[in-house]
Image: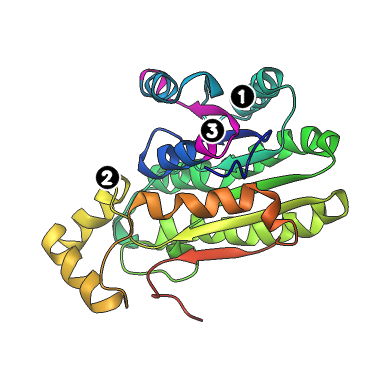
Amino acid sequence: MSGRLSGKRIIITGAIGNIGKEAVRSFVAEGARVVIGDIDEHAGRAVVAEFGGATHFVKVDVSSEASVASLLAQGVEWLNGLDVLAQNAGLQRSGPITGFSQTDWDALFAVNARAHFFGAKHAVAHLKRSGTGSIINMSSLAGKRGGPGLVAYSASKGAVVAFTTALAMELAPDNIRVNAICPGWVDTAFNQPAIDFMGGANVQQQKIAALVPLGRQARAAEIAPLFVYLASDESAYVTAQSFGIDGGVYNG
């Protein structure tokens, strides 16, 4: 590998799922040291065991500000600083608005939107000390273009797009860049609630064939290179952007 992230110190949340794990794989392969934050301690430590001494696990509940603050404090101590915060933790719930519960609505916003506020709030001081930095937020195609059964999920992910733009403007004078990744359909268990709502995998595949110009879902490994780019100095002039990786669905 080319060492595009050599010396970079990265904290990532939600790193045990398909996309997050592929991001960690790419970060490490490109020379970064990575702190993995996740609520599933067993799975998180398994990721560390797989990728070795360049990684370190810290248990975190991203819906709790105190827990996120502790992740940042412990992560920065292990890394001896911070260059990149990748906020990948997410939650999926689907269903028609008339039957959607306040509990599920609040859970989506706690994990998909509010957690980004907590992470950024407690990362900024460390990124300022580094003299530069990158915050990578995970949104979704649904944050730009909603659909039936995705009202709550789309709202939470749309909040991330707006948050990313505003925060980028706020932190630009400190040379801290803020961008979002907006995947479309990705072949991951994360999307199972939406698949169930649509009527199962066969219906999903039919809709993907009809709606996605490239005619298929993405693989998690096809999302990871954008994490690397946004974490690297190659994107030093890129901020306030929400990048779609959706096979051509959203072109507005």
- Image quadrant assignment for residue 185: bottom left
| Residue at the image position 65 percent from the left and 36 percent from the top | 6
Identify residue for label 1: 71
Identify residue for label 3: 62
Identify residue for label 2: 189
Q: Using a 10 Å C-alpha cutoff, classify the residue at mark 1 as few (fewer than 14 neighbours), some (14 to 19) or many (20 or more).
A: many
Residue at the limit of the structure toward the left, as seen here = 202
Mark 2 or mark 3: which comes first in sequence? Answer: 3
Rounded to the nearest angstrom, the CA distance separating label 2 from label 1 is 26 Å
Mark 2 or mark 1: which comes first in sequence? Answer: 1
> Amino acid type of disc 3?
Val
> Amino acid type of disc 2?
Ala
Residue 35 in magenta stretch: yes
Element under disc 1: helix
How is the protein colored in the picture?
A: rainbow
Residue 71 in magenta stretch: no
